[in-house]
Image: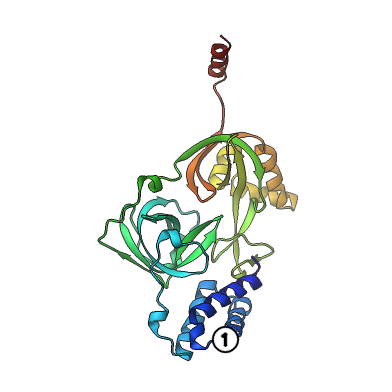
Amino acid sequence: MKIEERIEELSSQLYEKFKDYGISKKEIAKRLKLLLLEFKVPETEALRTITNYLVREYQIPKEEVRAPTTKVFEIKEPGRWISVKAKVVQLWEPTSPSISQTGLIGDETGLVRFLIWSKAGKPEVEEGKCYLFKNVVTDEFGGSMRINVTRYSEIEEINEDIKVSEELRYPGELEIVGSLVAIQQNSGLIQRCNECGRVVKSGMCPVHGKVGWYDDLRIRGVIDNGENTYEIILNEENIKDLTGIDLEGAKKMAKENLDRSVVLSELKRMLLGKYLKVGGDLVGRFLMVRRVEFYKPEITAEIEKLLEIIG
């Protein structure tokens, strides 16, 4: 989504929320453009700044501003400020120093990814415990919804036993064998925004505009096991396990060739069409890979099975 389209979307959301108080959508859009495009303020801070301005200027009751408590199943749109009661189902290893914790939380209605930014300075949560996540912002990342805990959020442990069904608790403990039939755009040696971790193109983040960035190595691919297709994300560790290429090696390759795209070309050469054995967590349409290896069938066992069939 282009930054102009995002500004229009956010302006509409704020206008719909406070239109009964006589606010102007044009005024909201103007202030958003100023903060996001000119001053390069992060989106969450821009929204908070404008909300505070509207509350003061139009004497909006604070009750109208408080994030509504939402069930996980209802989290379907990015850019919403909400509160949610949930149990921490799984904790994952953070992929960046800017991330304090990440994983899955859930209630009786579903599961959603969560992320606590290091800059938020919030206490760590524990797997199996229940919390009230207050004033968190919804986001869409990697094809699925998640909630982001920022410095404006609060995390409060609650003395409740939120039931997450066994069906939901372990939704992604899936292992498949299939052919890597496609490697999608934004794979290979990529650049990520220092603020939110999104992919940066030509120095521009789709949310934060012109920002600082850091290098990362990843593959977004499609696995076909003959029955279904799964979209997968391979991180640097996964790629190194399969190809021996790590981030430093990829950067060296790009520097020697004066071309970052050679990394993607080499990864395609080494991996496209190969059969992989993949295990991980199914979140939305994505299989978040925990382990991956080349599939090496036991040829002898396969021959014996064929002989038995033939008789």
| 8 or 185: nearer the viewer | 8
| 121 or 234: nearer the viewer | 234
Position in image of residue 60 (x %, y %): 43, 86
Q: Residue at 70% of width from left, 51% of height from top?
A: 254
Outermost residue to the top: 311
Q: Is residue 168 something that shows in the picture?
A: yes
Residue 85 sits in quarter: bottom left
Outermost residue to the front: 20
Neighbor class of circle 1 (other Cα within 10 Å; few <14, some 14-19, many 20+) is some
Q: In the displayed structure, would residue 274 be above or below residue 140?
A: above
Position in image of residue 94 (x %, y %): 46, 54
| 306 or 250: nearer the viewer | 306
Q: Residue at 63% of width from left, 62% of height from top?
A: 200
Position in image of residue 193 (x %, y %): 58, 63
- Please give the residue where the numbered disc 1 appears in the rendered image: 24
How many marks the image carries: the answer is 1
User: In the rendered view of the protein, which quadrant contains the N terminus?
Assistant: bottom right
Q: Is residue 58 left or right of residue 3?
A: left
Element type at mark 1: loop
Outermost residue to the left: 159
User: In the rendered view of the protein, which quadrant contains the C terminus?
Assistant: top right
